[in-house]
Amino acid sequence: LLNQRVCKIEPKSEYNKIFFRYAIEKPLFYIQKSIAGTTVKHLSQSNINDLNLPTPPLSEQRKIATVLHTVDQAIQKTEGIISQIESVLSGVTEELLIGGYGEKEFQQNRIYSFEFQMPTDWEVVEIHSLNKDSKPICYGIVQPGDYHEDGIPILNIEHSRYGDEIDVDELHQV
């Protein structure tokens, strides 16, 4: 069951529509304490009708709206650029970690069900062989409180699905 209220608010001609959109977002944050309901908050028509909004002259509203809209557009463009950079980084990382750097000869290789080309001078090794003193990496369950900021990262089973990226900054350390 969904209870939803939709209200259309169209500003008069002495209000710039873009300014109005920005102006109405902020006061809604402040009236949340007066909204009725214990677990599901309800915004009544009287909450909206009693809302006070700043009203500078129309020429200033236009200037403010232009600045806020320009900032929003810059944020959207920046988010798009960041997304493109992350995509390029992901591709380059995958290319370098599987294909190496520079011109090389390649051979077909397989790790579990994943088939790929790998430089002929590379080898596939088990993770434990990379561990210092060839000791096992896993020592059982690490209890909360055993984590250390400058320790060794722990790779849990949740990180082991193929295709998932591992954010090493989010790994616990022992």
Image (cartoon, rainbow, N blue to C red):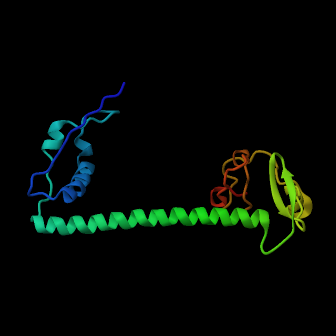
Q: Residue at x 26, y 44 (%)?
A: 33
Percent across and percent down for residue 59 are: 12, 68
Residue 86 lies in what quarter of the image?
bottom right
Percent across and percent down for residue 108 are: 86, 57
Residue 42 lies in what quarter of the image?
top left
Q: Residue at x 81, y 51 (%)?
A: 115
The residue nearer to you, when weighing 73 against 170, is 73
Percent across and percent down for residue 146 are: 70, 53
Eyeballing the image, is 104 above or below 33? below
Residue extending furthest toward the bottom: 102
Eyeballing the image, is 100 above or below 18? below
Q: Residue at x 56, y 67 (%)?
A: 85
| Residue 38 in view of the camera | yes
| Residue 150 in view of the camera | no
Relative side of 112 to 34, left or right: right
Q: Quadrant of the N terminus?
A: top left
Q: Residue at x 80, y 55 (%)?
A: 116
Percent across and percent down for residue 173 are: 70, 58
Relative side of 73 to 145, left or right: left
The residue nearer to you, when weighing 57 against 99, is 99
Numbered marks: total: 0
Q: Quadrant of the C terminus?
A: bottom right
Residue 103 lies in what quarter of the image?
bottom right
